[in-house]
Amino acid sequence: MPRFRETVPIDDYVLDVLMRDLVGHDHQAAAFLVYLYLYRQAQQQKWRPVTASLRMVAEATGLSKSTAQIAVEKLRARQLIRSMKDYATAIPKYRILRHWRESA
């Protein structure tokens, strides 16, 4: 019996454009991994914001905490995610932004 039985539909844009852009052009493979992780979590939660600490993101992706932090900053700067906190020391909530799905 397979260990995982659920598939995750991923927008073509993520694999055809975003991967090449983040990994090839920006040399930020870690940002792409973090985006895929958050994308999956958001998809599971019906696109509601994902609550995840940097430690959780790092452990889930196999990255160091500092690399995960740099990746999150890169995704924020590229406007691929938005993060918010209820208060200064709260665990952040990340919203995946999919601008390519917006109508013109």
Image (cartoon, grey):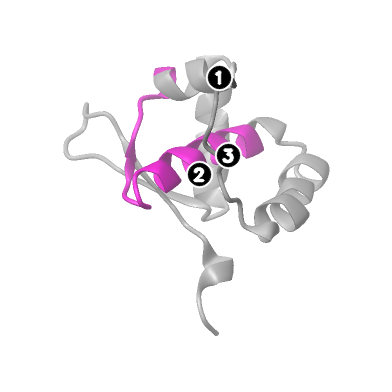
- Mark 2 nearby-residue class (10 Å; few <14, some 14–19, many ≥20): many
Residue identifier under label 3: 36
Q: Is residue 68 above or below residue 32?
A: above
Residue 55 screen position, x and y as percent = 42, 17
- Mark 1 nearby-residue class (10 Å; few <14, some 14–19, many ≥20): few
Residue identifier under label 1: 3
Front one among 11 and 80:
11
Quadrant, the N terminus: top right
Is residue 48 in the magenta section?
A: yes
Residue 38 screen position, x and y as percent = 48, 39
How far apart in space, not on screen, are marks 2 and 3 (Cα)?
A: 5 Å
How far apart in space, not on screen, are marks 2 and 1 (Cα)?
A: 21 Å
Disc 2 marks a residue whose amino acid type is Tyr
Instruction: Tell me where the magenta segment starts and ends, as one range.
Output: 31-55
Quadrant, the C terminus: bottom right
Q: Is residue 51 above or below residue 13?
A: above
Which sits earlier in the primary sequence, circle 2 or circle 1? 1
Is residue 88 in the magenta section?
A: no
The secondary element bearing badge 1 is classed as: loop
Residue 87 screen position, x and y as percent = 17, 36
Q: Could you tell whether 85 is left or right of 64 in the image?
A: left
> Residue 39, which numbered label?
2
Disc 3 marks a residue whose amino acid type is Leu
Q: Is residue 81 above or below residue 50?
A: below
**Secondary structure of the magenta portion, mostly?**
helix
Identify the residue at horizontal 50%, vertical 20% (top origin).
Answer: 60
Label 2–label 3 contact, CB within 8 A: yes
